[in-house]
């Protein structure tokens, strides 16, 4: 009797192993069926109330930002398509509102002979706003910044109305306009809109934040180059831009005042 | 006799348990490792759903079921730029779908105190390594444009970009995209761009916790060299 029981105890695991191996390896058997069933397991899993999900948001951009960007786009197109091509002209797109912390950013980039403008906004400013994406054919972006000679020439020519020799604008491959809180990039400055053409600290308007107090002024030497006007705070002009008092500020000969009183050539 | 019988029964029970454990664990791992791409994608998505739904928190400790995901390699060539861009767009869409369209806010775990845990909180998973064998060079801008044009199979009439941007964002990290190179499609969970925002601002409580999932396209070499995120290992440990 004892031997029979002993044999029985050995038979059970052996039989189990055989069945398991068959179940495991034989095609179309249990594990294949398990796999098929597993495919749709999510359908049977309840969605508990406590599951934390990110909010569904879609593309969101504040209306004031949208209007200003549409105005910028229309103004650039107005310059490019003006029936009369006045050299060294100015246009007013209406100034950019504060683009906001983690807010909206505008990127203009030269791509295959055209300039593409992409707008990012929404939660944490990372969503692409598709309907504001614009391609400007036959356009090169530029800035009034980059060297002291260049900004001196611009200042003397359009603010002091002196004759100058040499260039007074700087074509670039990329322009980014966004809101900067200083601490985000490890520099100390007042929060505000910022224009950049490269990495922090590189040549051009890339050292100071709140350097985009342009009063909505755009400059174009030839209706192909469209220039933004970065500003600085301390000097009449330096490598980083022009003193904002002479662009959007209180000076009688500021670009904005001269534009409003038609002392400067208008692009269209 | 009774004592011997109990010992043998216990032995059988232990054997059964061990064999069952080995078979089940082995089967699931083997299956995911050898599964066809579509099956692996489905298993990954479903285990992620389980993981998100089965999350248990006891005080500061939380746990859940494992995600059985693996990084898939896909070779492709294209005759035209449009063809290449569409292929990449579809891969990004599929990665977003697998990762539950970015719905779970902390699929890799809680934020913790970012100042102390550093980059380990910046977690991501490589859905695909796209091996671009032959074809024209494509630009970031054109790729972004096509993401807004290519129709999403998960949203009637909507674009892949709209589909991803319902809850997340798209980040095209490098450009241009040339052939004979490998590009990774990455699911990025709660990763901020700025070091300063994540280390100082968050630590001081100046900003709310960052909660934003997204899909990145990034050169595999850049991903390995710059380590922009802490890459979660797949089920094969790669």
Image (cartoon, rainbow, N blue to C red):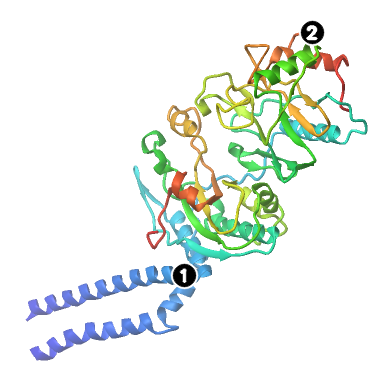
Which disc, if any, is residue A252?
A: 2
Q: Residues within 10 Å of mark 2 (few under 14, many from 20)?
A: few
Task: Please tell me whether mark 2 or mark 1 is closer to you in this view.
Answer: 2
Q: Nearer the viewer, residue B236 or A266?
A: A266
Q: Residue at x 79, y 8 (%)?
A: A252
Would you place residue A7 above or below residue B80 in this image? Answer: below
Image spot of residue B7 (x, y percent): 12, 75
Chain letter of the residue beneath label 2 in the structure image? A
- Quadrant position of the N terminus of chain A in the picture: bottom left
Q: Residue at x 39, y 84 (%)?
A: A26
Q: Is residue A219 left or right of residue A32?
A: right
Image spot of residue B20 (x, y percent): 30, 73
Would you place residue B110 above or below residue B182 in this image? Answer: above
Image spot of residue B230 (x, y percent): 42, 47
Outermost residue toward the front? A165
Q: Residues within 10 Å of mark 1 (few under 14, many from 20)?
A: some
Image spot of residue B130 (x, y percent): 54, 60
Q: Is residue B151 visible?
A: no
Same chain assignment for discs 2 and 1: yes
- Quadrant position of the C terminus of chain A in the picture: top right
Count how many numbered circles sit on residues in the image. Answer: 2
Q: CA distance from mark 2 to mark 1?
A: 76 Å
Chain letter of the residue beneath label 1 in the structure image? A
Q: Which residue is denoted by mark 1 in the rendering?
A: A38
Outermost residue toward the right? A83
């Amino acid at each position: 009797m004892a031997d029979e029981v002993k044999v029985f105890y050995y038979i059970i695991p052996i039989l189990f192993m055989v069945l398991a191996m068959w179940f495991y390896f034989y095609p179309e058997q249990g594990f294949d069926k398990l796999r098929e069933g597993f495919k749709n397991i999510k359908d049977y899993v309840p969605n508990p109330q406590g599951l934390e999900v990110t909010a569904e948001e879609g593309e969101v951009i504040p209306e004031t930002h949208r209007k200003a960007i549409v105005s910028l786009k229309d103004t650039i197109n107005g310059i490019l398509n003006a029936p009369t091509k006045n050299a060294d002209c100015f246009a007013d797109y209406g100034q950019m509102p504060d683009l906001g912390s983690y807010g909206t950013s505008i990127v203009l980039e030269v791509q295959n002979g055209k300039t593409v403008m992409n707008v990012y906004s929404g939660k944490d400013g990372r969503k692409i706003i598709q309907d504001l994406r614009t391609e400007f054919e036959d356009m090169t972006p530029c800035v009034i910044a980059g060297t002291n000679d260049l900004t001196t020439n611009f200042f003397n020519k359009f603010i002091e109305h002196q004759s100058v020799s040499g260039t007074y604008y700087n074509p670039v491959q990329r322009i980014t306009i966004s809101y900067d809180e200083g601490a985000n990039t490890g520099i100390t400055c007042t929060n505000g809109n910022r224009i950049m053409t490269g990495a922090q600290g590189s040549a051009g308007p890339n050292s100071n934040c709140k350097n985009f107090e342009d009063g909505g002024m755009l400059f174009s030497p030839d209706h192909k180059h469209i220039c933004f006007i970065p500003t600085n705070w301390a000097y009449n002009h330096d490598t980083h831009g022009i003193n904002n008092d002479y662009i959007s500020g209180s000076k009688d000969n500021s670009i904005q005042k001269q534009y409003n009183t038609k002392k400067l050539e208008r692009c269209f | 006799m009774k004592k011997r019988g109990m010992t043998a029964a216990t032995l059988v029970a232990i054997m059964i348990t061990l064999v069952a454990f080995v078979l089940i664990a082995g089967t699931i791992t083997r299956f995911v490792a050898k599964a066809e791409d579509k099956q692996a994608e489905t298993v990954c998505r479903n285990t992620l759903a389980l993981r998100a739904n089965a999350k248990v928190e006891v005080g500061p400790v939380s746990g859940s079921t494992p995600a059985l995901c693996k990084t898939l390699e896909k070779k492709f060539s294209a005759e035209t730029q449009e063809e290449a861009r569409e292929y990449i767009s579809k891969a990004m869409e599929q990665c977003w779908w697998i990762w539950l369209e970015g719905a779970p806010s902390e699929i890799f775990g809680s934020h913790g105190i970012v100042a102390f845990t550093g980059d380990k909180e910046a977690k991501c998973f490589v859905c695909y390594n796209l091996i671009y064998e032959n074809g024209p060079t494509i630009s970031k801008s054109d790729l972004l444009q096509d993401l807004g044009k290519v129709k999403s199979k998960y949203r009637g009439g909507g674009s892949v970009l709209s589909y991803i941007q319902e809850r997340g964002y798209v980040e095209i990290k490098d450009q241009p995209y040339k052939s004979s190179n490998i590009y990774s499609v990455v699911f990025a969970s709660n990763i901020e761009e700025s070091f300063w925002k994540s280390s100082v601002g968050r630590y001081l409580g100046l900003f709310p916790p960052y909660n934003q999932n997204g899909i990145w396209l990034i050169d595999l070499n850049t991903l390995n060299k710059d380590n922009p995120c802490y890459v979660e290992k797949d089920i094969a440990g790669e």
